[in-house]
Amino acid sequence: MQLLALGVNHHTAPLAIREQVAFGPEKLEHALHDLTQSRRATEVAILSTCNRTELYVNSPEPETVSAWLAEFHRIEPQELAPYLYALPREKAAQHAFRVAAGLDSMVLGETQILGQMKQAVQTAEKAGTLGLLLHKLFQRTFSVAKEVRSSTEIGANSVSMAAAAVRLAERIFPGIREQACLFIGAGEMIELCITHFAAQHPHRMTVANRTVERARPLADRFAAGAIPLTALPDELAKYDIIVTSTASPLPILGKGLLERAVKQRRHRPIFIVDLAVPRDVEAEVAEMNDVFLYTVDDLGQVVREGMDNRVAQVAQAEAIIETSVESFVHWMEGRELVPVIRSLRDAGERHRRHEIEKAQKALARGEDPAKVLDALSHTLSNKLLHAPTYALSHASRDEREQVARLVSKLYGLHQE
Protein backbone atom coordinates (compact mmCIF):
# COMPACT_ATOMS: atom_id res chain seq x y z
CA MET A 1 0.00 0.00 0.00
CA GLN A 2 1.58 3.28 -1.13
CA LEU A 3 -0.70 6.13 -0.07
CA LEU A 4 0.00 9.52 -1.65
CA ALA A 5 -1.67 12.93 -1.52
CA LEU A 6 -0.56 15.17 -4.37
CA GLY A 7 -1.75 18.57 -5.54
CA VAL A 8 -1.76 22.35 -5.30
CA ASN A 9 -3.72 24.68 -3.03
CA HIS A 10 -4.07 28.33 -2.07
CA HIS A 11 -0.96 28.07 0.14
CA THR A 12 1.32 26.84 -2.66
CA ALA A 13 -0.09 28.16 -5.94
CA PRO A 14 -1.69 31.38 -7.22
CA LEU A 15 -5.11 31.35 -8.84
CA ALA A 16 -3.54 31.45 -12.32
CA ILE A 17 -1.96 28.03 -11.65
CA ARG A 18 -4.87 26.51 -9.71
CA GLU A 19 -7.34 27.18 -12.50
CA GLN A 20 -5.11 25.33 -14.98
CA VAL A 21 -5.28 22.08 -13.00
CA ALA A 22 -8.91 22.30 -11.87
CA PHE A 23 -11.17 19.37 -12.79
CA GLY A 24 -14.63 20.40 -13.93
CA PRO A 25 -17.52 18.02 -13.19
CA GLU A 26 -17.63 16.97 -16.83
CA LYS A 27 -13.96 15.86 -16.73
CA LEU A 28 -13.80 14.24 -13.32
CA GLU A 29 -15.01 10.70 -14.05
CA HIS A 30 -12.90 10.50 -17.20
CA ALA A 31 -9.85 11.63 -15.21
CA LEU A 32 -10.42 8.99 -12.52
CA HIS A 33 -10.64 6.23 -15.13
CA ASP A 34 -7.69 7.57 -17.12
CA LEU A 35 -5.36 7.56 -14.11
CA THR A 36 -6.29 4.04 -12.95
CA GLN A 37 -6.35 2.56 -16.45
CA SER A 38 -2.88 3.97 -17.11
CA ARG A 39 -1.77 1.74 -14.19
CA ARG A 40 -0.11 4.68 -12.46
CA ALA A 41 -2.52 4.20 -9.56
CA THR A 42 -4.73 1.34 -8.39
CA GLU A 43 -7.05 3.66 -6.43
CA VAL A 44 -7.76 7.39 -6.81
CA ALA A 45 -10.08 10.15 -5.59
CA ILE A 46 -9.83 13.74 -6.85
CA LEU A 47 -10.80 16.79 -4.78
CA SER A 48 -11.14 19.91 -6.94
CA THR A 49 -12.40 23.19 -5.42
CA CYS A 50 -11.74 26.89 -5.86
CA ASN A 51 -8.84 26.65 -3.40
CA ARG A 52 -7.28 23.27 -4.19
CA THR A 53 -6.85 20.38 -6.58
CA GLU A 54 -5.71 17.24 -4.79
CA LEU A 55 -5.29 13.61 -5.82
CA TYR A 56 -5.44 10.89 -3.17
CA VAL A 57 -4.00 7.72 -4.65
CA ASN A 58 -2.75 4.22 -3.94
CA SER A 59 0.10 4.07 -6.42
CA PRO A 60 2.89 1.57 -7.06
CA GLU A 61 4.83 4.43 -8.71
CA PRO A 62 3.90 7.68 -6.90
CA GLU A 63 6.39 9.76 -8.87
CA THR A 64 4.44 9.14 -12.09
CA VAL A 65 1.20 10.65 -10.71
CA SER A 66 2.51 14.22 -10.94
CA ALA A 67 3.55 13.55 -14.54
CA TRP A 68 0.02 12.34 -15.27
CA LEU A 69 -1.52 15.51 -13.74
CA ALA A 70 0.59 17.76 -15.97
CA GLU A 71 -0.05 15.56 -19.00
CA PHE A 72 -3.83 15.47 -18.44
CA HIS A 73 -4.05 19.27 -18.26
CA ARG A 74 -1.47 19.79 -21.02
CA ILE A 75 0.92 21.72 -18.79
CA GLU A 76 4.68 21.42 -18.88
CA PRO A 77 5.78 19.41 -15.79
CA GLN A 78 8.47 21.97 -14.97
CA GLU A 79 5.85 24.73 -14.96
CA LEU A 80 3.74 22.89 -12.40
CA ALA A 81 6.54 21.44 -10.25
CA PRO A 82 7.30 24.54 -8.09
CA TYR A 83 3.70 24.65 -6.82
CA LEU A 84 3.15 20.92 -6.33
CA TYR A 85 3.29 19.01 -3.05
CA ALA A 86 3.51 15.22 -2.77
CA LEU A 87 2.82 13.76 0.68
CA PRO A 88 3.43 10.03 1.29
CA ARG A 89 1.85 7.66 3.84
CA GLU A 90 1.27 9.27 7.27
CA LYS A 91 1.77 12.78 5.87
CA ALA A 92 -0.95 12.09 3.31
CA ALA A 93 -3.32 10.87 6.03
CA GLN A 94 -2.51 13.88 8.21
CA HIS A 95 -3.17 16.22 5.29
CA ALA A 96 -6.53 14.61 4.50
CA PHE A 97 -7.58 14.88 8.15
CA ARG A 98 -6.53 18.56 8.34
CA VAL A 99 -8.33 19.44 5.11
CA ALA A 100 -11.60 17.81 6.20
CA ALA A 101 -11.40 19.48 9.62
CA GLY A 102 -11.04 22.93 8.02
CA LEU A 103 -7.48 23.49 9.28
CA ASP A 104 -6.00 23.88 5.80
CA SER A 105 -8.72 26.17 4.43
CA MET A 106 -8.48 29.84 3.52
CA VAL A 107 -11.33 30.26 6.02
CA LEU A 108 -10.03 28.49 9.12
CA GLY A 109 -12.66 26.07 10.40
CA GLU A 110 -15.04 26.41 7.45
CA THR A 111 -17.37 23.47 6.93
CA GLN A 112 -17.96 23.57 3.17
CA ILE A 113 -14.76 21.66 2.40
CA LEU A 114 -16.03 18.58 4.26
CA GLY A 115 -19.07 18.40 1.97
CA GLN A 116 -16.83 18.87 -1.07
CA MET A 117 -14.57 16.04 0.08
CA LYS A 118 -17.55 13.75 0.63
CA GLN A 119 -18.76 14.57 -2.88
CA ALA A 120 -15.30 13.72 -4.27
CA VAL A 121 -15.44 10.34 -2.52
CA GLN A 122 -18.94 9.64 -3.84
CA THR A 123 -17.76 10.43 -7.37
CA ALA A 124 -14.79 8.07 -7.00
CA GLU A 125 -17.03 5.35 -5.59
CA LYS A 126 -19.40 5.72 -8.54
CA ALA A 127 -16.46 5.52 -10.94
CA GLY A 128 -15.19 2.41 -9.19
CA THR A 129 -11.75 3.86 -8.35
CA LEU A 130 -11.86 3.41 -4.57
CA GLY A 131 -10.39 0.32 -2.95
CA LEU A 132 -9.66 -0.86 0.58
CA LEU A 133 -6.97 1.76 1.33
CA LEU A 134 -8.87 4.88 0.24
CA HIS A 135 -12.15 3.60 1.68
CA LYS A 136 -10.43 3.29 5.05
CA LEU A 137 -8.64 6.64 4.66
CA PHE A 138 -11.82 8.59 4.01
CA GLN A 139 -13.80 6.68 6.63
CA ARG A 140 -11.19 7.81 9.18
CA THR A 141 -11.05 11.30 7.63
CA PHE A 142 -14.75 11.97 8.11
CA SER A 143 -14.64 10.52 11.62
CA VAL A 144 -11.73 12.81 12.56
CA ALA A 145 -13.49 15.86 11.09
CA LYS A 146 -16.57 15.08 13.16
CA GLU A 147 -14.50 14.71 16.34
CA VAL A 148 -12.67 18.00 15.71
CA ARG A 149 -15.98 19.82 15.15
CA SER A 150 -17.59 18.38 18.25
CA SER A 151 -14.56 18.65 20.57
CA THR A 152 -13.29 22.13 19.63
CA GLU A 153 -14.63 25.52 18.63
CA ILE A 154 -12.55 25.64 15.47
CA GLY A 155 -15.59 26.72 13.44
CA ALA A 156 -16.80 29.37 15.89
CA ASN A 157 -17.17 32.87 14.43
CA SER A 158 -16.01 31.60 11.05
CA VAL A 159 -16.39 34.15 8.26
CA SER A 160 -17.39 32.36 5.07
CA MET A 161 -16.48 33.44 1.55
CA ALA A 162 -20.13 34.40 1.08
CA ALA A 163 -20.13 36.61 4.19
CA ALA A 164 -16.83 38.14 3.07
CA ALA A 165 -18.41 39.06 -0.28
CA VAL A 166 -21.15 40.97 1.58
CA ARG A 167 -18.54 42.79 3.70
CA LEU A 168 -16.62 43.87 0.60
CA ALA A 169 -19.82 45.08 -1.10
CA GLU A 170 -20.58 47.21 1.97
CA ARG A 171 -17.18 48.89 1.54
CA ILE A 172 -18.01 49.84 -2.05
CA PHE A 173 -21.64 50.96 -1.59
CA PRO A 174 -23.20 52.98 1.27
CA GLY A 175 -25.68 50.13 1.72
CA ILE A 176 -26.97 47.05 -0.11
CA ARG A 177 -30.68 47.86 0.22
CA GLU A 178 -30.59 50.14 -2.82
CA GLN A 179 -28.53 47.80 -5.00
CA ALA A 180 -29.53 45.23 -7.63
CA CYS A 181 -27.72 41.90 -7.28
CA LEU A 182 -27.02 39.31 -9.98
CA PHE A 183 -25.91 35.78 -9.09
CA ILE A 184 -24.44 33.73 -11.93
CA GLY A 185 -24.63 29.97 -11.39
CA ALA A 186 -26.92 27.81 -9.28
CA GLY A 187 -24.54 25.67 -7.24
CA GLU A 188 -23.80 25.48 -3.53
CA MET A 189 -21.54 28.55 -3.43
CA ILE A 190 -24.11 30.75 -5.16
CA GLU A 191 -26.78 29.45 -2.79
CA LEU A 192 -24.61 30.51 0.17
CA CYS A 193 -23.96 33.92 -1.35
CA ILE A 194 -27.59 34.67 -2.19
CA THR A 195 -28.53 33.65 1.37
CA HIS A 196 -26.10 36.20 2.85
CA PHE A 197 -27.04 38.99 0.45
CA ALA A 198 -30.77 38.35 0.89
CA ALA A 199 -30.35 39.01 4.61
CA GLN A 200 -29.37 42.59 3.69
CA HIS A 201 -32.62 43.05 1.69
CA PRO A 202 -31.20 44.32 -1.63
CA HIS A 203 -33.48 46.23 -4.00
CA ARG A 204 -33.59 43.35 -6.51
CA MET A 205 -32.01 39.93 -7.01
CA THR A 206 -31.69 37.72 -10.10
CA VAL A 207 -30.17 34.28 -10.71
CA ALA A 208 -28.62 33.63 -14.12
CA ASN A 209 -27.79 30.10 -15.22
CA ARG A 210 -27.17 28.14 -18.40
CA THR A 211 -30.67 26.71 -18.00
CA VAL A 212 -33.44 28.75 -16.39
CA GLU A 213 -35.04 25.53 -15.09
CA ARG A 214 -32.02 24.95 -12.82
CA ALA A 215 -32.00 28.57 -11.64
CA ARG A 216 -35.72 28.92 -10.91
CA PRO A 217 -36.01 26.80 -7.71
CA LEU A 218 -33.18 28.80 -6.11
CA ALA A 219 -34.60 32.09 -7.36
CA ASP A 220 -38.09 31.28 -6.09
CA ARG A 221 -36.79 30.60 -2.57
CA PHE A 222 -35.55 34.20 -2.35
CA ALA A 223 -38.21 35.93 -4.46
CA ALA A 224 -35.60 36.57 -7.14
CA GLY A 225 -35.83 36.59 -10.91
CA ALA A 226 -34.30 33.95 -13.19
CA ILE A 227 -32.65 34.47 -16.57
CA PRO A 228 -30.52 32.37 -18.97
CA LEU A 229 -26.84 33.16 -19.50
CA THR A 230 -27.66 34.15 -23.08
CA ALA A 231 -29.53 37.18 -21.68
CA LEU A 232 -26.44 38.61 -19.94
CA PRO A 233 -25.40 41.02 -22.75
CA ASP A 234 -28.76 42.78 -22.45
CA GLU A 235 -29.20 42.48 -18.67
CA LEU A 236 -25.73 43.06 -17.22
CA ALA A 237 -25.95 46.88 -17.06
CA LYS A 238 -28.96 46.65 -14.72
CA TYR A 239 -26.93 45.25 -11.81
CA ASP A 240 -24.65 46.91 -9.26
CA ILE A 241 -23.40 43.72 -7.59
CA ILE A 242 -22.46 40.55 -9.49
CA VAL A 243 -21.42 37.29 -7.84
CA THR A 244 -20.41 34.47 -10.14
CA SER A 245 -19.45 30.84 -9.51
CA THR A 246 -19.95 28.40 -12.37
CA ALA A 247 -18.12 25.33 -13.64
CA SER A 248 -17.48 26.90 -17.04
CA PRO A 249 -13.99 26.12 -18.41
CA LEU A 250 -13.94 29.54 -20.15
CA PRO A 251 -14.73 33.06 -18.87
CA ILE A 252 -18.39 34.11 -19.00
CA LEU A 253 -17.82 37.83 -18.50
CA GLY A 254 -15.27 39.38 -20.85
CA LYS A 255 -13.77 42.85 -20.82
CA GLY A 256 -15.73 43.94 -23.92
CA LEU A 257 -19.05 42.88 -22.40
CA LEU A 258 -18.35 44.80 -19.19
CA GLU A 259 -17.12 47.87 -21.06
CA ARG A 260 -20.50 48.08 -22.79
CA ALA A 261 -22.31 47.57 -19.47
CA VAL A 262 -20.32 50.33 -17.75
CA LYS A 263 -21.02 52.71 -20.65
CA GLN A 264 -24.78 51.99 -20.39
CA ARG A 265 -24.59 52.65 -16.65
CA ARG A 266 -22.93 56.03 -17.28
CA HIS A 267 -19.89 54.80 -15.35
CA ARG A 268 -21.71 53.94 -12.16
CA PRO A 269 -19.49 51.31 -10.47
CA ILE A 270 -20.03 47.55 -10.70
CA PHE A 271 -18.87 45.30 -7.86
CA ILE A 272 -17.96 41.74 -8.99
CA VAL A 273 -16.97 38.73 -6.91
CA ASP A 274 -15.61 35.86 -9.01
CA LEU A 275 -15.59 32.70 -6.89
CA ALA A 276 -15.05 30.33 -9.81
CA VAL A 277 -11.93 28.30 -10.60
CA PRO A 278 -11.25 28.48 -13.51
CA ARG A 279 -12.28 32.16 -13.41
CA ASP A 280 -15.62 33.31 -14.80
CA VAL A 281 -14.35 36.86 -15.40
CA GLU A 282 -11.45 37.74 -17.70
CA ALA A 283 -8.43 38.94 -15.68
CA GLU A 284 -8.22 42.14 -17.79
CA VAL A 285 -11.50 43.33 -16.23
CA ALA A 286 -9.55 44.18 -13.06
CA GLU A 287 -7.86 47.01 -15.01
CA MET A 288 -11.16 48.85 -15.64
CA ASN A 289 -11.74 52.05 -13.64
CA ASP A 290 -15.42 51.53 -12.84
CA VAL A 291 -15.31 47.83 -12.01
CA PHE A 292 -14.27 46.46 -8.62
CA LEU A 293 -13.30 42.83 -9.25
CA TYR A 294 -12.41 40.40 -6.46
CA THR A 295 -11.35 36.75 -6.87
CA VAL A 296 -11.24 33.99 -4.26
CA ASP A 297 -7.65 34.96 -3.40
CA ASP A 298 -8.61 38.62 -2.97
CA LEU A 299 -11.13 37.63 -0.29
CA GLY A 300 -8.37 36.05 1.79
CA GLN A 301 -7.67 39.09 3.97
CA VAL A 302 -11.35 39.60 4.76
CA VAL A 303 -11.96 36.03 5.84
CA ARG A 304 -8.88 36.09 8.09
CA GLU A 305 -10.25 38.98 10.15
CA GLY A 306 -11.36 37.94 13.62
CA MET A 307 -9.48 34.64 13.42
CA ASP A 308 -7.76 34.85 16.83
CA ASN A 309 -10.42 32.90 18.72
CA ARG A 310 -10.34 30.05 16.21
CA VAL A 311 -6.53 29.93 16.11
CA ALA A 312 -6.57 29.15 19.84
CA GLN A 313 -8.48 25.94 19.03
CA VAL A 314 -5.95 24.71 16.46
CA ALA A 315 -3.60 23.03 18.96
CA GLN A 316 -6.43 20.90 20.33
CA ALA A 317 -7.56 19.97 16.82
CA GLU A 318 -4.00 19.07 15.79
CA ALA A 319 -3.67 16.77 18.83
CA ILE A 320 -6.81 14.89 17.77
CA ILE A 321 -5.42 14.55 14.24
CA GLU A 322 -2.00 13.35 15.43
CA THR A 323 -3.57 10.52 17.44
CA SER A 324 -5.77 9.57 14.48
CA VAL A 325 -2.79 9.53 12.11
CA GLU A 326 -0.94 7.10 14.39
CA SER A 327 -3.98 4.82 14.46
CA PHE A 328 -4.36 4.91 10.67
CA VAL A 329 -0.66 4.22 10.05
CA HIS A 330 -0.86 1.27 12.45
CA TRP A 331 -3.77 -0.08 10.40
CA MET A 332 -1.83 0.40 7.13
CA GLU A 333 1.21 -1.40 8.50
CA GLY A 334 -1.03 -4.22 9.70
CA ARG A 335 -2.54 -4.57 6.24
CA GLU A 336 0.96 -4.83 4.74
CA LEU A 337 1.52 -7.98 6.85
CA VAL A 338 -1.65 -9.66 5.57
CA PRO A 339 0.15 -11.67 2.82
CA VAL A 340 2.63 -13.07 5.41
CA ILE A 341 -0.17 -13.91 7.86
CA ARG A 342 -2.17 -15.58 5.08
CA SER A 343 0.86 -17.67 4.01
CA LEU A 344 1.49 -18.71 7.60
CA ARG A 345 -2.10 -19.81 8.08
CA ASP A 346 -2.14 -21.60 4.71
CA ALA A 347 0.98 -23.56 5.70
CA GLY A 348 -0.57 -24.53 9.03
CA GLU A 349 -3.79 -25.58 7.31
CA ARG A 350 -1.90 -27.79 4.83
CA HIS A 351 -0.12 -29.57 7.69
CA ARG A 352 -3.43 -30.03 9.54
CA ARG A 353 -5.26 -31.49 6.53
CA HIS A 354 -2.38 -33.86 5.73
CA GLU A 355 -2.21 -35.26 9.26
CA ILE A 356 -6.01 -35.55 9.56
CA GLU A 357 -6.08 -37.64 6.36
CA LYS A 358 -3.35 -39.91 7.75
CA ALA A 359 -5.23 -40.30 11.04
CA GLN A 360 -8.51 -41.09 9.28
CA LYS A 361 -6.81 -43.81 7.23
CA ALA A 362 -5.26 -45.30 10.39
CA LEU A 363 -8.64 -45.34 12.13
CA ALA A 364 -10.20 -46.97 9.07
CA ARG A 365 -7.59 -49.75 9.34
CA GLY A 366 -8.77 -50.37 12.90
CA GLU A 367 -5.75 -48.95 14.77
CA ASP A 368 -6.14 -47.86 18.41
CA PRO A 369 -7.81 -44.38 18.43
CA ALA A 370 -5.74 -43.24 21.44
CA LYS A 371 -2.49 -44.10 19.66
CA VAL A 372 -3.73 -42.42 16.45
CA LEU A 373 -4.56 -39.19 18.30
CA ASP A 374 -1.23 -39.25 20.13
CA ALA A 375 0.67 -39.68 16.86
CA LEU A 376 -1.41 -36.89 15.25
CA SER A 377 -0.61 -34.43 18.01
CA HIS A 378 3.10 -35.30 18.05
CA THR A 379 3.45 -34.95 14.28
CA LEU A 380 1.59 -31.61 14.20
CA SER A 381 3.70 -30.23 17.05
CA ASN A 382 6.92 -31.28 15.34
CA LYS A 383 5.91 -29.73 12.02
CA LEU A 384 4.75 -26.43 13.54
CA LEU A 385 7.86 -26.13 15.72
CA HIS A 386 10.33 -27.21 13.02
CA ALA A 387 10.79 -23.72 11.48
CA PRO A 388 11.57 -21.80 14.74
CA THR A 389 13.73 -24.68 16.03
CA TYR A 390 15.70 -24.75 12.76
CA ALA A 391 16.08 -20.93 12.84
CA LEU A 392 17.47 -21.08 16.40
CA SER A 393 19.90 -23.90 15.76
CA HIS A 394 21.21 -22.48 12.47
CA ALA A 395 21.41 -18.81 13.46
CA SER A 396 24.83 -17.19 13.24
CA ARG A 397 26.57 -15.94 16.35
CA ASP A 398 25.42 -12.35 15.62
CA GLU A 399 21.82 -13.38 14.96
CA ARG A 400 21.37 -15.93 17.76
CA GLU A 401 20.33 -13.56 20.56
CA GLN A 402 17.91 -11.62 18.34
CA VAL A 403 16.30 -14.83 17.00
CA ALA A 404 15.95 -16.19 20.53
CA ARG A 405 14.20 -13.04 21.71
CA LEU A 406 11.89 -13.10 18.70
CA VAL A 407 10.95 -16.78 19.17
CA SER A 408 10.36 -16.17 22.89
CA LYS A 409 8.06 -13.26 22.04
CA LEU A 410 6.17 -15.20 19.36
CA TYR A 411 5.54 -18.21 21.60
CA GLY A 412 5.14 -16.35 24.91
CA LEU A 413 8.16 -18.07 26.49
CA HIS A 414 9.58 -16.90 29.83
CA GLN A 415 13.28 -17.49 30.03
CA GLU A 416 14.91 -17.84 33.43
Image: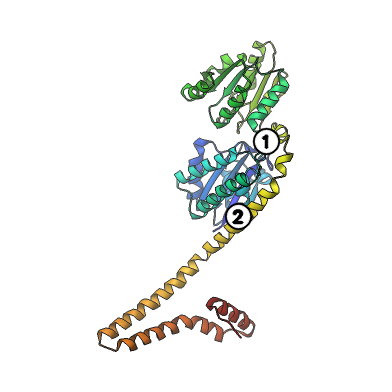
Q: Earlier in the sequence, mark 1 or mark 2?
A: 1
Tell me if mark 1 has few (under 14), some (14-19) or many (20+) residues whose alpha carbon lies within 10 angstroms of its own.
some
Q: Quadrant of residue 62?
A: bottom right
Compared with 385, 120 (above or below) is: above
Kind of residue at disc 2? Ser
**Circle 2 residue:** 324
Which quadrant: the N terminus? bottom right
Of residue 268 and residue 137, the one placed in the foreground of this image is 137
Left or right position of 391 against 367: right
Question: Which residue is outermost to the left?
Answer: 365
Tag 1 near tag 2, CB within 8 Å: no
Q: Nearer the viewer, residue 216 or 158?
A: 158
Q: What separation in Å lies between label 1 and label 2 (alpha carbons)?
A: 26 Å
Secondary structure state at the residue bearing disc 1: loop
Q: Which residue does the image show at 30% across and 86% down from the upper left?
A: 369
**Residue 71 in the figure: left or right of residue 309:** left
Q: Label 2 crowding class (10 Å Cα cut-off): few <14, some 14-19, many 20+?
A: some
State whether residue 324 appears in this view. yes
| Frontmost residue, 138 versus 63 | 138
On residue 191, the disc is none
Q: Secondary structure at mark 2?
A: helix
- Of marks 1 and 2, the one in the foreground: 1
Residue highlighted by disc 1: 157
The image's colour scheme reads rainbow
Residue type for callout 1: Asn
Q: Is residue 72 visible?
A: no
Image location (x, y in percent) of residue 215: 50, 23
Expressed as whole percent of the image width and height from the top left, the position of residue 105 reads: 65, 41
